[in-house]
Image: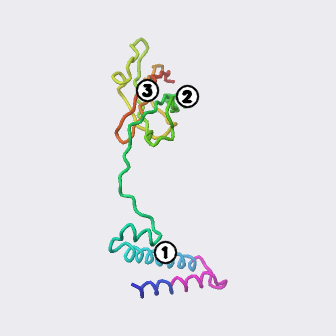
Amino acid sequence: MLQNWADSTADADAALTAARNETTRTPVATARCKTAFDALTAKMRDMKKRYFYMPPLTEADLVSLGLKVPDSTHTPSHVPTAHAAVETFLTGRHELGLRIVFVDGSPDDPANKGFRVWYKVIAPGETPPANPESDLTKSFFTKRRKDALEFEYGDSGKTAYMAIQIENDGKKGSWGPLVSALIP
């Protein structure tokens, strides 16, 4: 192992010397230098794993070497408590832009990871949804605060009703307000 490391160090040193020399500096010499240093880095990482992590070190050993102790404890996530609403804006034909805003709660809370946008398209004259939990039938998940929702060609002139539910690792928060928008 040490002989291989010494050989890789000598190769990297020779390639660096050739790449620094004015007469031998070419793109090929620069590429050889990069390849030699990549090989040296790989050997050094392999040595670190073999001699610092095999056999497995205790936490005290890792701290004494100045290494970071690996975190193997799963951090539990809690149920989102914030409420989010959706603001709509026009982006094009048969498409509505969505901007998700927090009504209450902190947007920096780690429980507020993603948003489930529930929606339903209603034709003129049909009964609008009253309860988002039972009446909104279609949904999509996003982690972005600004997204777009595309509709079919035949949905122009209909009304889309939407509500947001914040999700975190399968845990669902409470519903945001029901919002409606006319589909262009």
Q: What are the residue bounds of the magenta stretch?
A: 11-27
Residue carrying label 1: 38
> Magenta segment: does it hold 152?
no
- Please name whichever residue, 156 or 121, is drawn nearer the observer in this view of the structure: 121
Residue 124 in the image: x percent, y percent?
43, 14
Residue carrying label 2: 89
Which comes before the other along the chain, label 3 or label 2? 2
> Magenta segment: does it hold 16?
yes
Residue 2 in the image: x percent, y percent?
42, 86
Q: Residue at x 32, y 74 (%)?
A: 55
Residue carrying label 3: 163
Identify the secondary structure beneath mark 1. helix
Residue 8 in the image: x percent, y percent?
47, 83
Which comes before the other along the chain, label 1 or label 2? 1
Q: CA distance from mark 1 to mark 2?
A: 50 Å
Q: Amino acid at mark 3?
A: Ala
Does residue 141 appear left or right of residue 91 in this picture?
Answer: left
Q: CA distance from mark 3 to mark 1?
A: 52 Å
- Please name whichever residue, 24 or 116, is drawn nearer the observer in this view of the structure: 116
Figure check: 111 above or below 174 = below
Q: Name the outermost residue toward the top.
A: 125
Which comes before the other along the chain, label 3 or label 1? 1
Q: Nearer the viewer, mark 3 or mark 2?
A: 3
